[in-house]
Amino acid sequence: MKKKMLYTPCMLFLLIIQLCTAVWFCAQKQGYHYDEYYSYYSSNVTYALVPTDMEWKDTKEIQSEFMVLEDEGLDYGMVKLMQSLDVHPPLYYYLLHTVCGLTKGVFSKWQGLSVNLLFFVLSWLVLLQITKEITHNDKWKTMAVCALFGFSPAVFSGITFIRMYMLLTFECLLLLYVHIRAVMKEKRTFPGFYLPVILLSFLGFHTHYYFAVFLFFVAASTSLYLFFHKETRRAAFGYAASVLSGLILSVITYPACMRHIFRGYRGTEAQEAFFAVSNIWERLTFFFDLTNEYTFGSMLTIWLLVMIILGVTEKVIKNYRNLSKKHTENAEKPVWQPDKKAVALTAVVTLGYFLVVAKTALLNAEEAIRYEMPVYGLLILLVILLTTRQLSFFETEKNRRWLAGFFIGVCILMLFGEIYGLAKGKVCFLYPEDAENIAWAKEHEKEPVVYIYNTSNQWMIWDDSEELMQYESIYFVSSDHTDVKQDARLSDAEHVYVYKMRGDAADETYKELKKENGGFNNSKLIRELLYCDLYEISR
């Protein structure tokens, strides 16, 4: 009784510690990825960020595009239109727009981070329930899964990345939990099972198109189980109808999704990558290494080796007993098993999603960690299940405590690897270097600033949005021409700061700018940014 009473407070304390750690990393976030700027911009756009060639632009106009203004109401129609023009479904942007609408006149990282923190907690709770169902409420295994999930650098990176991936993770885990409950309890009524399937199919597809991959493996596995198990075929067709209803409703309410998937640039890239044979090994090893480093503290390879050794040892022992016909108490002892149906469903869905996403996602260094976010917790769960399964074969009355210690040691080793990764800066999307850049821009807010941009890649400008917001105004010049006009404010200045896109065209425009505004003879590189360089020109 005392152990049961202590367990719930311990789990609550674990969640609080992990949530506080997540908030601490959120506080360390100093800058934004371009996609994060796009999250705010496409959720709250007013006039659209379009640079006016050879004209000064008040930076308050830039800042206003990332917030809901005091005199503005919530405009979900605009949010939907912005996403239809791009390649994303709108649900996450509705949520972010709502949060920004509740905090009008503010552009803050905490608006987006608060959404992610909420869905981290919800994902944690759903993963806890999934683990309890599969392990028959085994408290130690549940604690191990939740501890490894909540301290994972990959998950913290998902929290600090202001995009839809934590929402997607929650929806995928909840979808799996609903199916595990239905398969195990064999209670599949319309309100209790089919209605949540319809709603989750609809909401998940409105969050990210990768949800369709997760849904495919869940639905295919469940349909086959219903069709070939003791269920009637009517139940299988009824279930399939509920899934299709959610998807059809999604297409009806957001028809742009079909264009995004089959003709959009990301959909086309994903299809090409999926059907390419030459990239299989490269992609699988890339995402395996990423998962190993950011989810398992670089301990996954060692763990796999130990599991192989234990598996081979078990096989040898079984063969020896069969040949010698020696049946000991240990040999006849049933090996611990979780719920086989639930484990099979979890394994098929997790591995299927991981492989398909690995074949289709962008290979953009550690930033690609976000694409596999929905299955990191499930991979941890499968690792814990396989570890206990292998160890249980060797369990006897005498070595039970030793094996329990070995299991705890494996978990602690992985946890140590995760915490070491956190200490070594494995949490992505924090951009600590931006703090100094923003402070520098703030110190020079009244100075004349020029931005030479490439018309075909205007989006690159906004990768430095917060830095640019620090100035009072910016003079935008297109690199499409070299006939740069004289500007009185630039001609009268002793020195000017110039953000210049890289490329020959921008170089020519840069020369003309200096020449036409009174002859700036000196040029000094201040710093290199991701898509442009900052120079100081003086006479």
Image: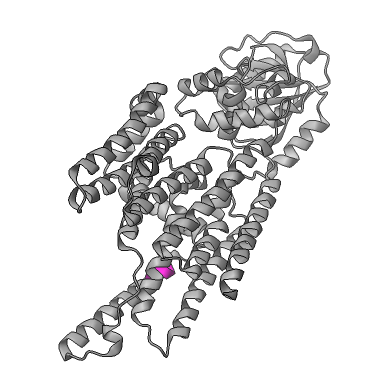
Q: Residue at x 73, y 26 (%)?
A: 469
- Please provide percent x and percent y for residue 419: 60, 63
Q: Compared with residue 93, is residue 215 higher up or lower down, i.e. above or below?
A: below
Answer above or below: position of 157 versus 55: below
Tag count:
0
Q: Which residues are magenta?
A: 301-305
Residue toward you, 109 or 129: 129
Is 362 left or right of 217, judged from the image as shown?
Answer: right
Up the image or down, 388 lies above or below 36; here it is: below
- The residue that appears at 28% across and 48% down in the rendered structure is 222
The front one of 103 and 9 is 9
* Image side of residue 393 versus residue 490, left or right: left
Would you say residue 34 is visible in this rendering?
yes
The C terminus appears in which quarter of the rendering?
Answer: top right
Q: Nearer the viewer, residue 19 or 531?
A: 19
Residue 86, x across and y down, in percent = 47, 24
Question: What secondary structure characterizes most of the magenta part?
Answer: helix
Whether residue 302 is in magenta: the answer is yes
Q: Nearer the viewer, residue 296 or 325?
A: 325
| Residue at 46% from the left image edge and 21% from the top image edge | 84
Tell me where residue 204 appears, x and y as whole percent.
43, 37
